[in-house]
Image (cartoon, helix red, strand yellow):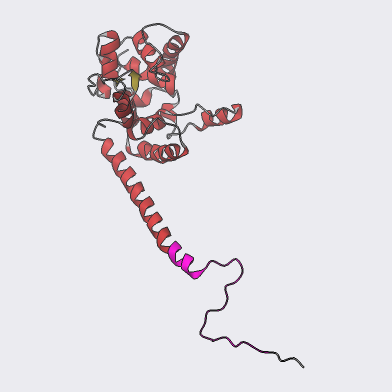
Amino acid sequence: MGHAYMISRNPTQDPPPKEGAMPRRRRGIRKPMMFWLRFMALRACLVMAGSVTIYAFVNPPMTWTMVGAAKQNPLVDRPWVPISDIAPVMRRSVVAAEDANFCNHWGFDMAEIRKVIASGSSHGASTLTQQTAKNAYLWQTRSWGRKAVETALTPLIEASWSKARILEVYLNVAEFGQGIFGIGAASREYFGTTADKLTLVQAARLAAVLPAPRSRSPHAASNRSRAIADGAATINRDGRAECFQLDLRP
């Protein structure tokens, strides 16, 4: 007759882990990790909110795009031009070229986004506010991380800045050519004038180079610049320029 031996278990020992359960040591590590991740995420949000608030009153200095461009070409002198000293035709031209519904959205143009999705394209529908967030705070290289931060910054900018301030910052940090940043530098370098004296033709040609400033020149007319001039007149007539028009000059 065989003998059955029963192995007794100390009742103070932990019960065997259930199948699929996380070991206690891993649970102990995960808890502080989640705490620090939440802490760092909160700090990042506070830093973003603080920097957006500061730039509502303080003009951005160098941007990451400028730093990268300076490694390839020397940057020309870049005077900051207040929105009141930028010709109304220049303001209207850049809005007509880049974001015709600028005055009517809160940072994201949902109608344009739906059109882009329906067309199957992966480009387009980026508003002036989104571009300002990218140009003032971030870098140009496409990545999901950059797009996520840009998406978080956009509503913060819309909530903290006026539309006129958004357009002012955009026009002062945008790249218009090799080493040429800002509407003040672009007006001087290309047309030998100041931003407040730009004509409709000059403004339309400057706005036409913005999607590809390193490969396009504002010295020659193009179908795009002519369309921008027409668009600038259109948004002036239909009221879509009201949120950034500061005077009644033509």
Say left or right for 59 vs 239: left
Q: Which residue is more in the foreground, 14 or 41? A: 14
Which residue is located at x 23 percent, y 24 percent? 80
Q: Position of residue 53 (x, y in %)?
A: 29, 40
- Return the x and y of residue 89 as percentages of the image width and height: 34, 15
Q: Dividing the picture into quarters, in which one does residue 172 lie?
A: top left
**Secondary structure predominantly adopted by residues drawn in magenta:** loop
Residue in the picture at 66% in, 89% down:
5
105 vs 202: above or below: below
Task: Examine the rendering and report whether any part of residue 86 can be seen.
Answer: no
Residue 13 percent across, percent down from the top left: 52, 82
Which quadrant is home to the C terminus? top left
Residue 227 visible in image: yes
Image coordinates for residue 144, horizontal then vertical, percent: 47, 38
Region in magenta: 5-30
83 or 117, which lies in front?
A: 117
**Quadrant housing residue 166:** top left
- Going by the picture, which residue comes out furthest to the top? 220
* Quadrant in which the N terminus appears: bottom right
**Is residue 117 shown above or below 4?**
above
Magenta run includes residue 28: yes
Q: Residue furthest right?
A: 1
